[in-house]
Image (spheres, rainbow, N blue to C red):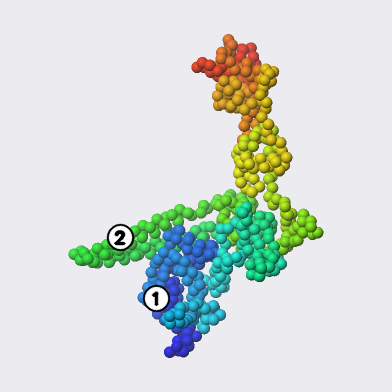
Amino acid sequence: MTEGLRAKAARGELRLTLPAGLDYDDGDHVIITPDEAVREAVTCVFRRFDQLGSARQVVVSLRTDGLRLPRRDIRTGKITWAQAGYPAVHDILIHPGYAGVFAYGRSKTEKHLDASGNVITRQRRLPRDQWPVTIPGHHPGYISLETYDANIARLAANAPPPAGAAGGAAREGAAWLQGLLRCGRCGRLMQVAYPSGGSPAYRCGRAHQMYGARSCQWIGGRRLHETVLDELLAVLAPACLAATIQAMSDAEAQHRQNLAVFERAAEHARYEAGRALRQYDNVEPENRLVARTLEAALEDKLAAVRTAENQLAAQRARRPVTLTDEETAWITTAGADLRAIFEAPATTNAQRKELIRAVITEIVATAGDAADGEDSGRTCQIRIIWQGGASTQVQMPMPASGKHGRATSEDTLALIRRLAPRYDDTTIAQILSQQNRRTATGLPFRKAHVKALRAYHEIPGYQPPPENVTPGCQDAAVVSITEAARQLGVSSATIYRWLRDGFVTGEQLTPGAPWQVRVDQQLRDRVRPQAPDGWLPLGQAAARLGVARQTVLNKVQRGELDAVYLTRGRRKGLRIQAESGQAGLFDTP
């Protein structure tokens, strides 16, 4: 009996249980199912795995979109629909039938006795080279055999590595070269480490873990990432234009492919609802025992229709914008800024790793030792192996021992040197934060950071001015907005308005820094409770001179017109000495 089955299987004539998406015709030949909903669902799994590169990510995307997957019941052979899960997606990806391969004996039944003498039975999957029967091209498939082999290799590469080992699927960690970096000394894959600073690093520590030997080398990730990224972008630069045009042309095609899955799902939901309605209509109204059951089933089917149609409408709303001929021509000229895309906040670390792995096969790094106790010339030899076998040799300088791998930018240090004589450390930190400047480790500036930088670079700190004790020192002083408002008896908003109108002069060392206003006796004399006789408000002065209000303000700012500011009464504001004989209409403001 068994030999007969094997002989029939060797000829490819044994009737096996087919996965969802494949059926037998009347002549017992395997064909692709005529059900478009099932066909689109299976195709969607392969398409999303090709895009995302991980079975788990395929499951997440299908669940996010609310798409269900078909499964074949082994006992009845009927197709049922269920929410996407990892077993369902994984079974579709590894089943050789979808590649047109007839495979017999993919698993083996093993039996053994446990400690109590009970027989334990389990199924164990066999590697492909141990399958008794394999017939490629046996029937039509969804993918080619080459694609199937690539998917199997990708799933194997995505498997979680052993504890402390490198490799695995592209994850959200900041180590972009995870699973690609190989030690140039011992040939082992280097492991990822995250020191207390948070920046990733790579170490070759397998010899230490396994044999207690010394670790080969330790390489910081920041410089290594920058070096590899520069080489990657340099290689991809000629392909930027083609990549941009291809991406724009593929967007519409991918949208149609994704939309087809939702359209088939909605069509299938409507079919199931129509079938439930026909069953409900055929039952006798008096038979409430059956009618109630069919009515509940009909309600469930109608709810599924509404859900499928809402998902279809949402997917249609995601249609990419079609560019005009002018926009396409501009893109042809400008191309894609791959560095901006790579460094964009919306780009995840997993996507960055996928981009790197699409171009680079492996990276071999060898850190050089210090020569004669002098490590200022340490370098790391990097060999980048590209897809296809070509390689690039790069030499990366490494920081000397005891030196900082990161340093504050020179323009920030120069700004601190300018601000330190006038402002305390807290104010300087606020100014730097308002300008979105960051420390060498990427943190917002705080008082402690400014103080540490001043101490390290020997920058003198702020010294408060001594108390003025003589009247002569009070005649002219450079003070803050708040102090100027107190001395002149006005509000801070008024001081800001005077600065804008040019009534007073002030200085701001850098954007975000507090204003410094010069208060002298002349300014104090211009701020008074009453105006001299004949001095006019701004609007009347502009009318008297026959010029615009802004022209009058410009003249006040240049000192061509005398002005005072009233601080009391209901008509507070500027008063300007505007005589009818003064030049106005045709002079240059």
- Give the residue at the far left of this rendering: 286
* Foreground label between 1 and 2: 1
Lateral position of residue 218 relative to residue 312, left or right:
right
Question: Percent position (x, y) of residue 481?
Answer: 60, 27
| Direction top: furthest residue | 533
Instruction: Please name whichever residue, 159 or 360, is drawn nearer the observer in this view of the structure.
Output: 159
- Residue 107 vertical position relative to residue 69 in the rendered view, above or below: below
The quarter of the rendered structure image containing the N terminus is bottom left
Q: Residues within 10 Å of mark 1 (few under 14, many from 20)?
A: few
Question: Is residue 102 in view?
Answer: no
Question: Type of residue at label 1?
Answer: Ile
Choose top left, top right, bottom left or bottom right for residue 149: bottom right
> Which residue is more in the foreground, 413 or 26?
413
Q: Classify residue 539 as left or right of residue 520.
A: left
Q: Is residue 282 left or right of residue 381?
A: left
> Residue at image x 64%, y 28%?
516
Residue at the disc numbered 2: 299
Residue hosting label 1: 74
Q: Is residue 508 visible?
A: yes
- Structural crowding at the residue carrying mark 2, measured as other residues with C-alpha within 10 Å and reported as few (<14), some (14–19) or many (≥20): some
Distance between mark 1 and mark 2 Cα atoms: 28 Å
Above or below, 37 against 377 in this view is below
Residue ID at (46%, 62%) = 62
CB-based contact (under 8 Å), mark 1 and mark 2: no
Q: Please name the residue shown 71% across and 36% down the image.
A: 460
Q: Picture coordinates of residue 153 (x, y %)? A: 57, 71
Q: Amino acid at mark 2?
A: Glu
Disc 1 on helix, strand or loop? loop
Residue 395 horizontal/vertical position (percent): 74, 59
Per the image, label 2 sits on a secondary structure element best described as: helix
